[in-house]
């Protein structure tokens, strides 16, 4: 199955000059989701994962499925003021400013083996912030895992020192 045919390009979204990679056609097709999951899971076999961290919001889709298949816990990382319990946070740079991500203080225990998952690796800012949160909590990052990578944005450079896997590379 060619998963690329389930990724829709949306021109000039969210702003002029950007080509947004829309994964909703993939999510709407059970066979495409099944194939995608098989490929993502195959890459994580025998890695003894304790937790899967998912980035709000599109990272949640596959991170929860990965956690289930790996018999691991799922940890949601969200934008500010969305989580109800005690939190740790990290700020990170965007091309047009800064943003912040938060995670519950008890979400990851020191020494737990963690997969960081998001839908897309673009400039690497969000992924690097996720890694910083995991390490702040004492977790060990086993892999940074993505449905797709926009390689022309060089996001892997921000993730040097981590194992990076992307199912689809553009």
Image (cartoon, rainbow, N blue to C red):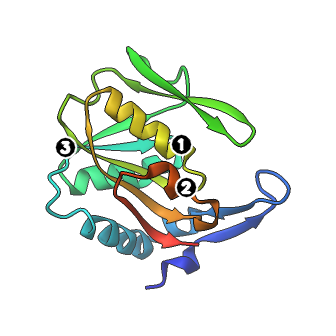
Q: CA distance from mark 1 to mark 2?
A: 10 Å
Quarter assignment of residue 1: bottom left
Which residue is rendered at x = 49% and y = 26% of the image? 90
Q: Position of residue 73 (x, y in %)?
A: 24, 41
Kind of element beneath mark 3: loop
Q: Mark 1 or mark 2, which is nearer to you? A: 2
Relative to residue 128, is residue 154 depicted above or below? below
* Label placed on residue 155: 2
Is tag 1's residue or tag 3's residue first in the polypeptide sequence?
A: 3
Q: Mark 2 or mark 3, which is nearer to you? A: 2
- Labels 2 and 3 touching (C-beta < 8 A): no
**Residue marked by disc 3:** 50
Q: Mark 1 or mark 3, which is nearer to you? A: 1
Q: CA distance from mark 2 to mark 3?
A: 25 Å
Which residue is rendered at x = 34% and y = 37% of the image? 75
Left or right of 143, for residue 120: right
Q: Position of residue 58 (x, y in %)?
A: 52, 50
- Labels 1 and 3 touching (C-beta < 8 A): no
Q: Dot 1, how many residues are within 10 Å of its Cα: few (below 14), some (14-19), or many (20+)?
A: many
**Residue marked by disc 1:** 126
Q: CA distance from mark 1 to mark 3?
A: 21 Å
Q: Dot 2, how many residues are within 10 Å of its Cα: few (below 14), some (14-19), or many (20+)?
A: many
Kind of element beneath mark 2: helix
């Amino acid at each position: 199955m060619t998963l690329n045919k389930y990724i829709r390009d949306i021109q000039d979204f969210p702003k002029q000059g950007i080509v947004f990679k829309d994964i909703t056609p993939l999510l709407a097709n059970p066979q495409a989701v099944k194939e995608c999951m098989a490929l993502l899971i195959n890459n994580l076999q025998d890695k003894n994962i304790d937790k899967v961290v998912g980035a709000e919001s599109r990272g949640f889709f596959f991170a929860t499925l990965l956690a289930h298949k790996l018999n691991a816990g799922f940890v949601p990382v969200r934008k500010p003021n969305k989580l109800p319990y005690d939190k740790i946070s990290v700020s990170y740079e965007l091309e047009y400013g800064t943003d912040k991500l938060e995670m519950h203080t008890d979400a990851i225990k020191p020494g737990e083996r963690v997969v960081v998952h998001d839908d897309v690796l673009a400039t690497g800012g969000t992924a690097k912030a996720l890694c910083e949160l995991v390490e702040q909590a004492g977790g060990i990052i086993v892999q940074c895992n993505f449905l797709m990578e926009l390689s022309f944005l060089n996001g892997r450079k921000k993730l040097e020192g981590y194992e990076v896997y992307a199912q689809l590379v553009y």
